[in-house]
Image (tube, helix red, strand yellow):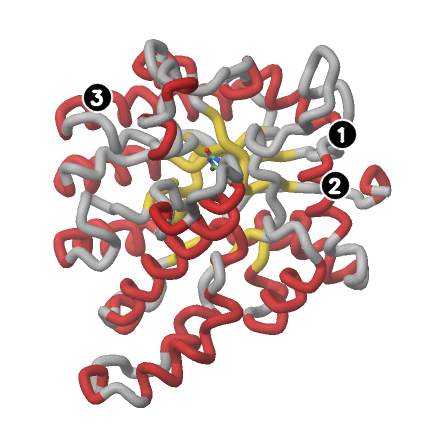
């Protein structure tokens, strides 16, 4: 069915570029609990689908995706020292831009920042603005280590707003990981709930500081359809309105700012997508896959030997929409918001 959908842009699709793989090679720890897991002391198996551009194109062709906006996957550069981050970010952004340049407009990118140095990050966003194919940056919820509501980040956010770049906000650490035992459900709960609450809390904290009153044109794209925010926004509004501590702190209620953010459609279900679209505008939602995560478990030789259920689910959940709205989510919004020239 999805082969007849026309143009498709994937804005949530990750990569560990070869130069980052070199840094990670000896031991890749992606999620926090892998550090403690004896069976994973050497990290998780990393196939070429995690780092190779031809493999990304193979994935795209298999799923009818014309254009991808690729971004470095978690944990980004969080595990490096500030000086190491600066060198790595500059190299990774140049490498990413070269991939875009050689891809004949099939690949665009979100760059990466050396967030432990705000000064260097401000320099890097200016470099990113001038690099071919890069349209924004991917950022974790830690920011420079103290969360997104860290006042030290304000000059960086102001510069990102001035340069009109989009911040793709993505979770990594999870919230409530210590509450998911004692049963072993693998990564199910950290990914389904921990990741989404991490985004929910980080964005709520940021909004409550009044950042969008100071920087009304700062553009955030929230991973995983904004975590739980589209559902909880009403409660957040009500809690602000009824809290004396919050009196006079915000010009508008939280949902006013939230609705104006951008969201991916990576929610795997029609009722979740309906909740998102009831909350924000169909003009603010962009389609994504989360590749190379969520591969099928039942393959014989190669993860790309058949279409991925995780991708098909994200196509299927929007089939109830009319063609005009579907096209907005599948490519027109990304084309406009990220200036993709499609
Ligand atoms: O669901 C996701 O986005 C991810 C991710 O980005 N990284 C990861 O390790 N697992 C799932």
Residue occupying the point 31% across, 55% down: 161
Q: Residue 123's mark?
A: none
Residue that badge 2 annotates: 312
Does residue 173 appear in this view? yes
In the depicted structure, whether residue 184 falls above or below residue 162: above
Q: Which callout, 1 or 3, points at the residue further toward the start of the chain? A: 3
Give the residue at x 37% y 19%.
38
Q: From the viewer's perspective, is residue 19 above or below residue 288?
A: above
- Please give the residue where the numbered disc 3 appears in the rendered image: 87
Residue 130, quarter of the rendered image: top left
Dot 1 crowding, Cα within 10 Å, few <14, some 14–19, many 20+: some
Residue highlighted by disc 1:
307
Q: What residue appears at the point 70 percent right and 20 percent down from the top-left corner?
A: 304
**Where residue 13 sits in the image (x, y, percent)?**
54, 35
Circle 2 or circle 3, nearest the eye:
2
Q: Is the Cβ of the residue at disc 1 closer than 8 Å to that at disc 2?
A: yes
Q: CA distance from mark 1 to mark 2?
A: 7 Å
Q: CA distance from mark 2 to mark 3?
A: 38 Å
């Amino acid at each position: 069915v999805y082969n007849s959908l026309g143009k498709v842009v994937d804005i949530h699709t990750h990569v560990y570029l070869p130069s980052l793989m070199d840094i990670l090679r000896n031991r890749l720890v992606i999620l926090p609990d892998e550090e403690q897991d004896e069976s994973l002391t050497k990290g998780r198996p990393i196939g070429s689908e995690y780092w190779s551009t031809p493999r990304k194109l193979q994935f795209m062709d298999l799923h009818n995706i014309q254009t991808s906006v690729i971004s470095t996957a978690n944990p980004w550069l969080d595990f490096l020292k500030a000086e190491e981050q600066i060198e790595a970010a500059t190299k990774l952004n140049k490498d990413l831009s070269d991939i875009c340049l050689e891809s004949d407009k099939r690949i665009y990118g979100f760059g990466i920042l050396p967030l432990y140095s705000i000064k260097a990050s401000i320099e890097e966003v200016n470099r990113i603005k001038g690099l071919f194919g890069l349209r924004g940056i991917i950022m974790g919820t830690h920011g420079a280590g103290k969360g997104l509501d860290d006042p030290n980040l304000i000059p960086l956010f102001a510069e990102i707003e001035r340069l009109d770049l989009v911040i793709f906000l993505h979770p990594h650490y999870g919230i409530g990981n210590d509450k998911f035992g004692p049963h072993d459900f693998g990564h199910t709960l950290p990914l389904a709930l921990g990741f989404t609450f991490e985004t929910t809390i980080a964005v709520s904290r940021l909004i409550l500081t009044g950042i969008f009153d100071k920087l009304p044109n700062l553009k955030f794209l929230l991973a995983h359809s904004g975590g739980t925010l589209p559902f909880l926004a009403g409660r957040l509004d009500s809690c602000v309105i009824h809290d004396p501590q919050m009196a006079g702190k915000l010009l508008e209620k939280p949902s006013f700012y939230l609705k104006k953010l951008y969201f991916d459609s990576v929610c795997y279900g029609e009722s979740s997508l309906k909740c998102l679209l009831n909350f924000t505008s169909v003009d603010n939602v962009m389609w994504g896959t989360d590749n190379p995560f969520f591969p099928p478990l039942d393959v014989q030789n190669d993860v790309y030997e058949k279409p991925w259920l995780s991708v098909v689910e994200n196509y299927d959940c929007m089939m109830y929409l009319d063609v005009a709205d579907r096209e907005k989510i599948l490519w027109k919004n990304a084309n406009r918001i990220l200036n993709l020239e499609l």
